[in-house]
Image (spheres, grey):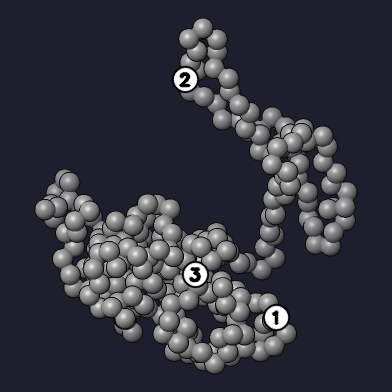
Amino acid sequence: MTKVTMIVNGKSVSAETEGRTLLVQYLREGLGLTGTHVGCDTSQCGACVVHVNGEAVKSCTMFAAEAEGAEVTTIEGMANPDGSLSVIQQAFQDHHGLQCGFCTPGMVMSAAALLKDNPRPTEAEVRAYLEGNICRCTGYHNIVKAIMAASGQDVAIAAE
Amino acid sequence: MPKDHGIGASSKRREDIRFLTGTGNYTDDINLRGQAHVVFVRSQVAHGRLNKVDTRDAEKMPGVIRVFTAKDFEGVGGIPCGWQITDRAGKPMLEPKHPVLAEG
């Protein structure tokens, strides 16, 4: 067991981990941050996306020890400081970008990473970026709408 | 344009807030003191015949509370069909069994 320390949602945290402990296990089991979900355990579904030093990462593909000293942001750190929903989260609610909500944390984290690098993506760019996030309520259409709206663009997208 | 009030207006879902902030509390998120966990043992072959299930070794494993097999669910299960139909020849529809756990 080794102690792994990192900054999660702005707070310095540490937990005892085994070498094989995945970042997602560290977050869920070590820190109790269960907003980051494990949908597939095989790096396909994207429900576990978090930001590590500002980059979107599937936290089931990374060992906790690899994130030693890193700045990690999870869905729990996405709301505004006063607790209100961030622009992206609010857009998901406004455009019904979720049903069961299981994929939603990963969708929001991916969307945030996309908009950071590409503040005004085209619809095609949004769809291409979400390649690694699977929604089984078949909600992609409204997810794309929500992300377009969060980027301040018209939501009346062509595919409707 | 969607309506903004009255019948047909879209309404905001109240459950979205917890889903969007990572506080959904799904089954996998619940971790209580002394909580038991379940593991399903699935067939290791794609197509075969189940002759018997030997649970003796599994029962001896440390921490195992209980091993369940189809015997524990006799008389439970099945998905009744509401409207049995017949085929062209008038023969009744075949209803597959849906046991809770695999039977031999």
In this view, B18 is above or below A83: above
Where residue B89 sits: x, y (%)? 51, 7
Q: Is A12 drawn above or below residue A96 in the view shown?
A: below
Residue found 84% across the figure and 62% down from its top: B62
What residue is rendered at 66% in x and 34% in y?
B99
Q: Are marks 3 and 1 on the same chain?
A: yes
Amino acid carrying mark 2 in the image: Trp
Disc 1 and disc 2 in contact, CB within 8 angstroms: no
Asked which secondary structure carries label 1, the reply is loop
Q: For this rendering, which residue is in front, A78 or B89?
A: B89
As drawn, the label of residue A18 is 1
From the image, which quarter does the N terminus of chain A lie in?
bottom right
**Residue kind at label 1, given as amino acid type:** Glu
Find the distance from the CA under tag 2 to the CA under tag 3: 43 Å
What secondary structure is marked by label 2?
loop
- Residue carrying label 3: A48
Instruction: Determine the chain carrying the residue at label 2.
Output: B
Disc 2 or disc 3, which is closer to the eye? Answer: 3
- Residue wearing tag 2: B83
- Where's residue A147, x and y in %? 27, 68
Q: Are marks 2 and 3 on the same chain?
A: no
Label 1 crowd bin: few (<14), some (14–19), many (20+), radius 10 Å: some
Residue A27 or A51: which is nearer the viewer?
A51
Q: Is residue B4 visible?
A: yes
Is A26 on the left or on the right of A139, as rendered? right
Under circle 3, the secondary element is loop
Q: Are marks 1 and 2 on the same chain?
A: no
Disc 3 marks a residue whose amino acid type is Cys
Q: Image point 19% across, 56% down: which residue? A: A158
User: In the picture provided, is A27 more to the left or to the right than B39?
Assistant: left
Q: Are marks 2 and 3 in contact (CB under 8 Å)?
A: no
